[in-house]
Amino acid sequence: MQVELTQTPLAEIDADLHVLPRTDAEAAVPKEFAQVPGADDAKTSFKAVTLLRPESDGGPERLAIVGLGDLEGLDGERLRVAAALAAREAKRWKCSTIAWRLPVKGSDEGSRLAVADIIAGTILADYRFDRYKSASDENSDESKGIERLVISVGGEVDDAMRTEAETARVSALAANQARELQQLPSNVVTPSYLAERAQELARLHPSLSCDVLDRDDMERLGMGGLVAVSSGSAEEPKLIVLRHTGSGETLGIVGKGVTFDSGGISIKPSRGMEEMKMDMSGASAALEATGAIAELGLPISVLCVIPSTENMPSGTAVKPGDIITQLNGKTVEVNNTDAEGRLILADALAYSVEQGADRIVDLATLTGAVLVALGSTYAALISNDDTLAAEVETAGRRTGEIAWRLPLHPEFKELTKGKEADLTNASSKGKAGTIYAAEFLEEFVGDTPWVHLDIAGTAWDVGRDYVGSGPTGYGVRLLVDLARDLASKQG
Ligand code: BES
Ligand code: ZN
Ligand code: ZN
């Protein structure tokens, strides 16, 4: 999607659909729209959409008046939702160009953020997955969707605003790429497919380089977690390493890349198991965010590490009670083969520390327990470092990919101690499942500042208007925002 910022008033922009956002605070519609029949009656409450057909010659074919509600409560989330509702109208009427009028005036931070939110909401809402639908199917749609978004900013367009817009555009398109990886079935998105995507990103962006380790490399290096989890699968596991060479410190990004989680020998119930193709949502967010950071040329170095495998039952699979040795030498009793994510992340975290990451953020669809605690609204954030935790929380608030911090505590750590080995991957007590997993992961980061995001609840089926009921790409926009923030602090 092409994005354009302009000083031209909305009424003069050539587009299939004009979008006029309105808050309760405005007494009347702007005079250039006062002649449109029905414009004055349009509701301004949040989420109210009134679609009108102006009759004037040369005007747009359609005008959508989108309610934003009260001015005091207007935030980024409301703008993303409003943008999604307008994009839905554009799709319904097959409009390829959509023009917005910015609801806030001036070239200050507020209007820059509003530009970013409208772009994000529009691009995210424009995503659809219909590549397997035959053209004759009623759900297939031949149109190309929204090709051009123009925003009338009501003032001068400066460089800061252009940068904000480009960041939002690249991040949202990257989130849609991540959603595509999430949505594709596990017979397509295998560990090798993810590795190819990483290599493709490296070909596209000169600052990126990619290394892919296979099963032999993992065995040689001592990545006992990845070796054990992948041992039941016919698919070759991959440890994908994608580096962005910027400047200054290195941000480590680790994403869980289980391309199908059957549970292994501790097999999951069959009902709903098809959802487990999305157990690589952390990996897709990490990869596409790294691609976006490279595309934007952010002045920070990134080390993105993806442990990727299937988790399958078979005669060669890891069994409950097996003891393995992870990359950092710690031993683990595998008491539940369905708690596989922590085993592969353990190796990836230790590897990232070894490779020189100064801080690490990991993203993983790690526990069902996080859905009980925080639903699909917040990811769980667990950290050994208050500064990094606050930075990630802030990036979450700015992008709407929000996270809520849960505590670490020695009493939880106690639960992770093994009977015969250093650690056990699942406790029979089943207490504090999300924190338990984080306590386990903490054993592999040493003193490196680290944030763990459990995205099992936020990666799909969130139901927000701009991401709907499928995959969300959670984490891509948060990570790009975080990288930008960290880069700006490096000076
Ligand atoms: N991939 C699952 C977690 C998950 C559950 C993601 C629901 C998305 C939706 C993970 O590997 C898993 O199976 N975790 C177990 C851990 C337990 C065995 C300690 C869980 O949460 O039940
Ligand atoms: Zn599992
Ligand atoms: Zn899993």
Image: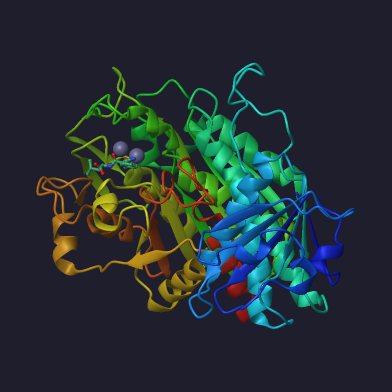
Find residue 476 and report its horizontal and vertical position in percent: 56, 55
Residue for point 53% across, 49% down: 285
Judge whether residue 491 can be spotted in this image: no
Residue at point 54% right, 75% down? 24
**Relative depth, front residue between 388 and 23:** 23
How far across and down, in percent of the image, does residue 292 sit? 67, 55
Q: Position of residue 282 (x, y in %)?
A: 47, 48
**Residue 198: in sight, yes or no?**
yes
Residue under the image location 56 percent in, 53 percent down = 304
Vertical order, 456 against 190 (above or below): below
Residue 171 sits in quarter: bottom right
Q: Quadrant of the C terminus?
A: bottom right
Going 66% across and 29% down the picture, which residue do you hit? Answer: 141
Considering only vertical position in the picture, is 43 above or below 426?
A: below
Q: Could you tell whether 56 is left or right of 173 in the image?
A: right
Whether residue 255 sits left or right of residue 379 in the image: it is: right
Q: Give the vertical position of 187 relative to 294 (above or below).
A: above
Image quarter for ligand 2 equals: top left
Residue 299, image quadrant: bottom right
